Amino acid sequence: MKLIAGIDIGNATTETAIAKIYNKNIEFIASGIVKTTGIKGTKENIHGVFASLNQALKKGKVDINDLDLVRINEAAPVIGDVAMETITETIITESTMIGHNPSTPGGVGLGVGYTVNIKSIKNMQEKQPSIVIIPRDVDFLEASSIINEAIENGIDIQGAIVQRDDGVLINNRISKVIPIVDEVSLIEKVHEGVKTAIEVAPVGGVVEVLSNPFGIATEFGLDSYETKMIVPIARALIGNRSAVVIKTPKGDVKERKIPSGKINVFGKKRKMNVDVDEGASVIMDVLRECNPIEDIKGEPGTNAGGMLEKVRQVMANLTKNHPNSIKIQDLLAVDTYVPQKVKGGLAGEFSMENAVGIAAMVKSDRLQMQMIADELEKEIGIKVEVGGIEADMAIRGALTTPGSNTPLAILDMGAGSTDASLISKDREIKSMHLAGAGNMVTMLINTELGLEDKDLAEDIKKYPLAKVESLFHIRHEDGSVEFFQDQLDPKVFARIVILKEGNMIPIPVNESLEKIRMVRRNSKKKVFVTNAIRALKMVSTTGNIRDIDYVVLLGGSALDFEIPQLVTDRLAQYGIVSGRANIRGIEGPRNAVATGLVLSYGEVKKNE
Ligand SMILES: Nc1ncnc2c1ncn2[C@@H]1O[C@H](COP(=O)(O)OP(=O)(O)OP(=O)(O)O)[C@@H](O)[C@H]1O
Ligand SMILES: [Mg+2]
C-alpha cells in the first residue's frame, strides 16, 4: 500500500487530495484547500502547500510521516494584477456637450429647446422651445415664479438646468412637469441660445433617449459622422437617471486616441505586431494567427511595452532568472471601459473611456517547479515530485465525476487561467492553457465601476444584488420582492446591496442596479465565454468545437452563480452539452487537478 498526496498550486487556491493506493485500487481519504501563498510557481508557495497538506492530513487522520509521495503540478503563473491601458480620452473644449447625473433631479421626461438664462426670459424675442438656465443667485422661489409666469405668457418651457441642488424644490412649485437637472457647478460655461436636450427618468428608471447615440442624433439632427462622435457621451449616460446633452459647435467634444504602443507576438511560425489601440478583438486575432506562441513582447518605451515587460520583470525577480529567459506564452486582451473625469466638464462629469485589459501568462518552467519540489522535500522529509501539467491532470480528475466517460472535454476555470483538455475514447489527451479567468473578471468589475476596492469587486462578482426599497423589504435583481419581519439596518436603506451569506453589503457607488449587473455579467462573458471558445477550439482534434459532445466545467469559477450558465448557453449554440463537474462524487467542481495528480501516479503503477 502507498499513501500519496496530490497538491495543486493555483493562482488563488492550493488544493490537496490524499489517497491510499493498494493493488489496483485507489481510495481517496481526504482533501485540503487553502489560499495560495505568493505568486504561483515561486518558492513562496511552500507555506500554502504545507498548510493545505496539513489540513488534509488532519481531516484524514493521517500522520505526515506515513506519506510515501507528494506530487505537485507543473504550474504556469498568470500575473494576477492585470494591466489596464486606457486608449481614448474625451476632452470637452469651451462650451459643451455634457452628461450629468445629479443625485436628485426634478420632474420627469425629455425636453429639447434652446438655452436661455432665467434673467433674460422676459425679454425673449422669439417664442421658441426653451431650456432655462438657473444660476446660483436665483433661488428656487424666484426661479419657479419666473417659470410659471413665462408658461402663462405662452413660452414653451422644455426643461431647466440648475446650479444649486434645487431641482425637486422647483419642480414642486411650477405648473408644468418638465425635466430639471441640478447641481451643474460650472453653469456659467453653458452658453445661451444653444440647442439642449434634458432627460430625467422616473424614479427607479434610467434615461433612454440620451443614452442612445441614435436618440441623440434624432433630437439634434446629427449626420452619421457626428453620431459617431457622440458615442462616448451616450455611453457615459447609460444607467443614469438624468442627463443633459448640449449641442456644441463642431469639434468641441473630442475623443482623442492615446497611442499605447504595439505588442509583438513571436509565434513558432509567424511573427506579427499589433497596435494596442486597435482593441481586444484585433489583438486576439493576431494571437490566434501566430499560434503556437513562443513569446510576446511589448514595444519598449510605450505603455503596452511597459505593461508586458513589468510582468516579465516581476517573474524574473521572483524566480531569480534573467528576464530574457521568461517567456510570455499567452495573453487575453479584453475591451473595457474606465471611468475618467472629462477634461473641461461642467459638473465633474465622468466619461467611460475605452481601455484594453490584459492578463498575461508566463510559460511554465519545469526546472522552477523542480526547485520548489526539492525545497518542499527537504522541509517535510517526504519524496516530492512534479506531476504533469494542470489540464492533463484536471481531466483525469474530472473523469471521477459520476456518469462521465471518455471522450470528454473539460474547462478548468480558475483564478488566473482557463484550461481546456480533451480525452479521446482511447484516452489520448490534448490540453491547452490560456491566460485570463476569475481574477480578470474581478479586475474588470473593479475598474469599470470605478470601485478601487478589489475585495468589494470580488463580492460583486460572487453574489447577487438587491435594492433595499423600504426598511422592511428588498427587491432582488430578478425583480422578486422579499419582506422582513424585523426592521433592516437604516444604513442600507435605498441602497444597492450585495446579498452575501445572509448579510447586506451596501455598494458605495452611485450606479443603478441594472448597470452594476450589466458590468458584472459582461465581464464574466468577456473572460469566460471568450476563453471557453478559444480553449476548446485549440483542443478539438479538427479545430472545430462542434466535434466536442460533452464539456465538464471545473475550478473555483465553476462555483459561480452565473458563469456556468453563461458558458453553457454559449456552448449549446455549438451543440455541446455542458455541466458542472462533481469530482469523486463529493467535491463539486473543485479538487480536479489534485485528484488527477494522484490518479496519474496510479495509472503508471497499474501499467507496470
Ligand atoms: N463561490 C464562488 N463563486 C464565484 N467565484 C468563485 C467562488 N469561489 C471561488 N471563486 C473564484 O474562483 C477562482 C479560484 O478558482 P480556483 O481555486 O480553481 O483557481 P486556482 O486553481 O487557484 O487558479 P489557476 O487554476 O488559475 O491557477 C477565483 O477567481 C475566485 O474568485
Ligand atoms: Mg486551478
Image: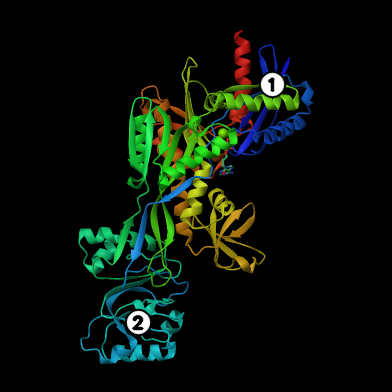
Q: Vertically, is 338 above or below 130? A: above
Looking at this view, is 550 or 132 the one in front? 132
Q: Quadrant of residue 314?
A: top right
In the displayed structure, does residue 261 sit left or right of residue 427? left
Res 128 quadrant in image: bottom left
Q: Nearer the viewer, residue 221 or 281?
A: 281
Classify the position of the C terminus by image quarter: top right
Residue sitting nearer the eye, 507 or 550: 507
Label pair 2/1, CB-CB below 8 angstroms = no
**Separation of residues labelled 2 and 1 (CA atoms):** 78 Å
Residue density around tag 2, few if under 14, some if 14–19, many if 20 or more, within 10 Å: many
Q: Position of residue 576 (x, y in %)?
A: 42, 31
Can I make out residue 399 in this image? no
Give residue 470's position: percent from left, percent from top: 57, 68
Tell me: 604 left or right of 513: right
Chain-order first, disc 2 or disc 1: 1
Rendered-image quadrant of the N terminus: top right
* Residue that lies at the very extreme toward the top in this rendered image: 608
Q: Amino acid at mark 1?
A: Glu
Residue 563 lies, in percent from the top left, at 49, 42
Is residue 25 something that shows in the picture?
A: yes
Disc 2 residue type (three-letter): Ile
Does the residue tagged 1 have its C-beta within 8 Å of any atom of ligand 2? no
**Which quarter of the rendered image does ligand 2 occupy?**
top right
Residue ID for mark 1: 27
- Mark 2 or mark 1, whichever is nearer to me: 2
Q: Quadrant of residue 6?
A: top right
- In the drawing, does residue 109 fall left or right of residue 359? left
Q: Above or below — where is 209 with respect to 579?
A: below
The vertical placement of 84 against 17, above or below, is below
Scheme by which the image is coloured: rainbow
Which residue lies under the disc numbered 2?
133
